[in-house]
Amino acid sequence: MKQSAPASATATDWKDAMFRTHAPEFVRILAGRPACIDPSWLGRIFPRAERRVSILDLGCGAGRLLRPLANIGSSVVGLDYSAELLACAMSEAQALGNVTLVKGDMRNLGDFFPKQHFQVIVRAYTSLGYFSRTVEGQILRACHDVSTPDGRLIVDTFNAEWFRAHPVIERTTHLADFDLLEHYAWNEGLHSVRCLWRYTRGDTVITEIPFDLDGYTLTELDQLLSTAGWARELLIRNIDRFQTAHENEGLERLVVVARKAKK
Ligand SMILES: C[S@@+](CC[C@H](N)C(=O)[O-])C[C@H]1O[C@@H](n2cnc3c(N)ncnc32)[C@H](O)[C@@H]1O
């Protein structure tokens, strides 16, 4: 395979390569993976759903979830650090009317929002392993601060148990003008998933983005939530399939709803 000069060669962080330098490719990948949100979930979490619900879409990216969230909540704030992805979300946000976009780093949540502001925080498809466990704990604590006392957090992560059982996974997606190869390999020593996303056009490699995502077992996820003042309420199949999942049924991704507990 030919290796063209990858545009990400100077990027030091995989997130910058994926979500900023190669934002156009990332947007096209997501366009082929529409995500909806099961509209029943709000009523299940908050039975008196006529109340106003303010939602934070943490790591909203190009705004894939903004419309379904805006249909559920009275107001939605989408926060992302990528100006390139937020630019793609802008016209949707303006058309919706009850959505505000904020450019910011989720590691500094307290700089952007007052305490006890959001009823629901959704961090979808932004696996917990993006940052070290210490930093993930800090982010979850900041989420706790900006949530109302009855606040809920929906968060997902790779399931370490599943990857242990499926140590090497490879998937190819054909898009209109390039192909995406995803390669995932479980690293038992680091307790993480070694990931590689490779974009190719014909036999030319556009770029390769290697990254590691921490794996969490459900027990580890519960512990992390607990240290940040959250308690798992539900394990669900996915945000668009809000059905309770069983702990031992082998899910690739753990998606949980947590409620505020004492820190
Ligand atoms: C896999 S995408 C998911 C986007 C969106 N939630 C969706 O489902 O379409 C992860 C998102 O996290 C954002 N992100 C990564 N690091 C971030 C940070 N430190 N602060 C805020 N957003 C961040 C990326 O820019 C990207 O939009």
Image: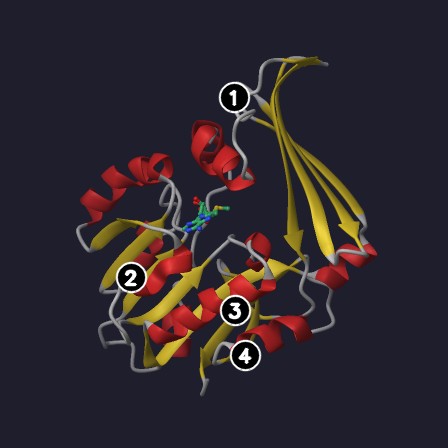
Q: Earlier in the sequence, mark 3 or mark 2?
A: 2
Q: In the rendering, at what x and y percent does residue 146 appear? A: 32, 71
Give the SS element for disc 3: helix
Depth check, front residue: 112 or 29: 112
Q: Give the residue at mark 4.
A: 227
**Sequence order check: which comes first, mark 4 or mark 1?**
1
Query: In this figure, which residue is indicated by the disc labeled 1?
Result: 7
Residue 121 in the image: x percent, y percent?
38, 66
How much space separates mark 3 and mark 1, taking CA atoms? 33 Å
Q: Is residue 147 above or below residue 173?
A: below
Q: Nearer the viewer, mark 2 or mark 1?
A: 2
Amino acid type assigned to the residue bearing label 4 in the image:
Thr
Which amino acid type is marked by label 2? Asp
Q: Which residue is mark 3?
A: 137
Which residue corresponds to the image point at 35% horizontal and 54% vertical from the top-left? 68
Question: Residue at (37%, 48%) from the top-left corner?
Answer: 80
Q: Are marks 4 and 3 in contact (CB under 8 Å)?
A: yes
